[in-house]
Image (cartoon, rainbow, N blue to C red):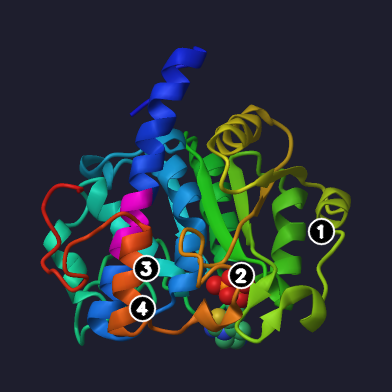
C-alpha cells in the first residue's frame, strides 16, 4: 500500500493504517492471553508505528527477503514482538494461524525474536536490551559499502535508551553519517520498574540526540499524519541519521491498561482480556484460535 501525496489519498489510506493498527492490538491481546504470558503494554503502544512502517514507509515484500535492496527492521526492544508478529502475519510473511504458537516451546514465534527460528525475518535476536542499534549500524553501513539501496529501521524503547551501549552506538551512527538509518524511540515514559524519568531521566532527549549528530523528529506516535510526515522527513535527510522520538502510550487503546507500568509484562486475566477486546470492538470469544485468515 502506498500513500499518495494528495490529501484525499492520504485520508483514505490513513483509515487502512488505522484498521491495521486495530488488528495488531486485537491480535496482541489474543496471543498473550491465549499463551498466558507476554508483554502487552509496549506492544499496544507501538501498533500505530508498526502499521505505518509496514503499510506505508518500508520498501518490502514477503517474496523479497533475499533482495539486498529491501528495507530492514531491527526490533531491538524484542519483548514487544507480539505486535510485530501480528503485522508480519497481516503482511503475508507468516500464516495468520501461526500466531497461536506465540511463546510455545519450539515455536518460530518466540517470546523474544530469535534469528535461528526466523532467519531472514529476524535481523538479529533481541531481548537483551541495547544491542539492536549496533546491529542496525552494521546493516546500514554494509548497505552503503555494497552499493545497496534501501533503509534500515531500528526500534528501541525509552527504558532501553538507559543502556550505555546505546549511546556508543548513537555516536557510531552519526560518525559514519548513516543517512540510510532511521531510529524510532518508543517513548512512553514507562519501563518495567516504573517511570523512566524517575529511574534514569533521558530528557531533554531531543537536544541530546541533536548534539550527538542526529536529525531529530519529535512526534505523537499515535497520530498517523505526524508519523507519515516523520518517515518522509527521515527519508529526505541525506547527511545524517534520523531519529523519530515517538511519544506513545503504554497499553494504548485499552483504558485500564493505559499508562500503567504493570502492563509492561503482565498477562490479562480471561475477564480482562475479554474486556480489552471489547474496547477494541471485538465481540467474539477472546480465545478464538487460530485467528481468522482475514483481518476482522
Ligand atoms: C540488558 C537488559 N537489561 C535488563 C533487561 C530487563 N528488562 C526487560 S524489559 C525492561 C524495560 C524496558 O523498558 P522499555 O524499553 O521502555 O519498554 P516498555 O516497558 O515501554 O515496553 C527491562 C529493564 C533486559 N531485557 N535486558
First in sequence, mark 2 or 3: give its number: 2
Question: Would you identify the image quadrant in which residue 132 lies?
Answer: bottom right
Using the numbered discs, state the Cα–Cα distance from disc 4 to disc 1 in whole angstroms. Answer: 35 Å
- Magenta stretch, main secondary structure, is helix
The residue where tag 3 is placed is 276
Using the numbered discs, state the Cα–Cα distance from disc 2 to disc 3 in whole angstroms. Answer: 15 Å
Label 4 or label 1, whichever lies nearer to me, is 4
First in sequence, mark 1 or 3: give its number: 1
Label 2 or label 3, whichever lies nearer to me, is 3
The residue where tag 4 is placed is 272
Is residue 232 in the magenta section? no
Looking at this view, is 282 or 123 the one in front? 282
Camera sees residue 70: no
Using the numbered discs, state the Cα–Cα distance from disc 2 to disc 1 in whole angstroms. Answer: 20 Å
Using the numbered discs, state the Cα–Cα distance from disc 1 to disc 3 in whole angstroms. Answer: 32 Å
The residue where tag 1 is placed is 205
Where residue 134 appears, as percent x and y from the top left, is 60, 64
Figure quadrant, ligand 1: bottom right
The reply to whether callout 3 and callout 4 are in contact (CB within 8 Å) is yes
Which element carries disc 1, helix, strand or loop? helix
Amino acid at each position: 500500500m502506498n500513500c499518495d501525496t494528495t490529501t484525499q489519498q492520504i485520508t483514505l489510506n490513513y483509515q487502512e493504517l488505522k484498521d491495521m493498527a486495530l488488528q495488531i492490538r486485537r491480535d496482541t491481546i489474543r496471543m498473550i492471553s491465549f499463551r498466558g504470558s507476554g508483554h502487552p503494554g509496549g506492544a499496544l503502544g507501538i501498533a500505530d508505528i508498526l502499521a505505518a512502517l509496514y503499510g506505508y514507509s518500508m520498501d518490502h515484500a514477503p517474496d523479497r527477503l533475499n533482495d539486498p535492496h529491501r528495507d530492514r527492521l531491527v526490533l531491538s526492544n524484542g519483548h514487544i514482538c507480539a505486535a510485530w508478529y501480528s503485522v508480519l502475519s497481516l503482511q503475508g510473511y507468516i500464516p495468520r494461524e501461526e500466531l497461536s504458537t506465540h511463546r510455545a516451546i519450539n515455536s518460530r514465534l518466540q517470546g523474544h525474536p530469535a534469528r535461528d527460528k526466523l532467519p531472514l525475518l529476524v535481523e538479529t535476536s533481541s531481548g537483551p536490551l541495547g544491542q539492536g542499534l549496533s546491529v542496525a549500524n552494521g546493516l546500514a553501513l554494509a548497505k552503503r559499502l555494497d552499493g545497496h539501496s534501501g533503509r534500515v529501521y531500528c526500534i528501541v524503547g525509552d527504558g532501553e535508551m538507559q543502556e550505555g551501549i546505546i549511546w556508543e552506538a548513537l555516536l557510531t551512527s552519526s560518525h559514519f553519517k548513516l543517512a540510510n538509518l532511521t531510529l524510532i524511540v518508543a517513548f512512553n515514559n514507562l519501563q518495567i520498574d516504573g517511570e523512566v524519568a524517575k529511574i534514569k531521566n533521558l530528557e531533554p532527549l531531543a537536544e541530546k540526540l541533536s548534539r550527538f549528530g542526529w536529525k531529530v523528529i519529535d512526534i505523537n506516535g499515535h497520530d498517523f499524519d505526524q508519523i507519515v510526515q516523520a518517515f518522509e522527513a527521515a527519508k529526505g535527510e541525506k547527511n545524517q541519521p534520523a531519529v523519530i522520538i515517538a511519544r506513545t502510550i503504554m497499553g494504548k487503546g485499552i483504558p485500564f491498561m493505559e499508562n500503567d507500568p504493570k502492563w509492561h509484562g503482565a498477562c490479562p486475566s480471561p475477564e480482562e482480556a475479554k474486556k480489552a477486546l471489547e474496547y477494541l470492538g471485538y465481540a467474539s470469544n477472546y480465545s478464538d484460535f487460530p485467528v481468522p485468515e482475514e483481518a476482522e
